[in-house]
Image: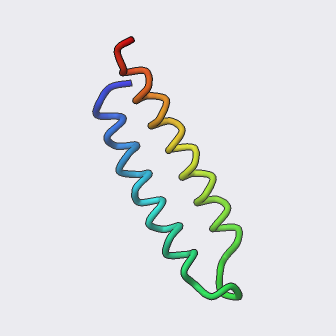
Amino acid sequence: MSKDVIAIVAIVSFMIWIAVSREAVKPSKEINWRKMITLLSAGSLSAVVITISLFQSLPF
């Protein structure tokens, strides 16, 4: 992947994890669990994509 795509994915991932943290600080009764699971899944997927792309760019 190009560096521009990785930068965009990193920014989107950062925004997703901010949304997760905002949802997580709400009281238990007010948490929208469907939104939380969706955000956690998207954040985890973006973290995996970033990790794989960074490992691929390492010289061996």
* Left or right of residue 46, residue 37 in this image: right
Q: Nearer the viewer, residue 33 or 28?
A: 28
What colouring method underlies this structural image? Answer: rainbow
Vertical order, 9 against 31 (above or below) = above
Where is residue 30? Give x, y as percent.
65, 86
Which residue does the image show at 47% across and 61% down from the upper left? 17
Q: Nearer the viewer, residue 21 or 39?
A: 21
Vertical order, 60 against 43 (above or below) = above
Q: Residue furthest left?
A: 4
Instruction: State the quadrant of the C terminus.
Output: top left
Where is residue 44? Give x, y as percent.
57, 48
* Left or right of residue 14, residue 28 in this image: right
Instruction: State the quadrant of the N terminus.
Output: top left
Q: How many marks?
A: 0
* Left or right of residue 47, residue 38 in this image: right
Q: Residue furthest front?
A: 60
Which residue does the image show at 51% across and 44% down from the upper left? 46
Which residue does the image show at 67% across and 62% down from the upper left? 37
Where is residue 52? Give x, y as percent.
49, 29
Which residue does the image show at 44% across and 25% down from the upper left? 55
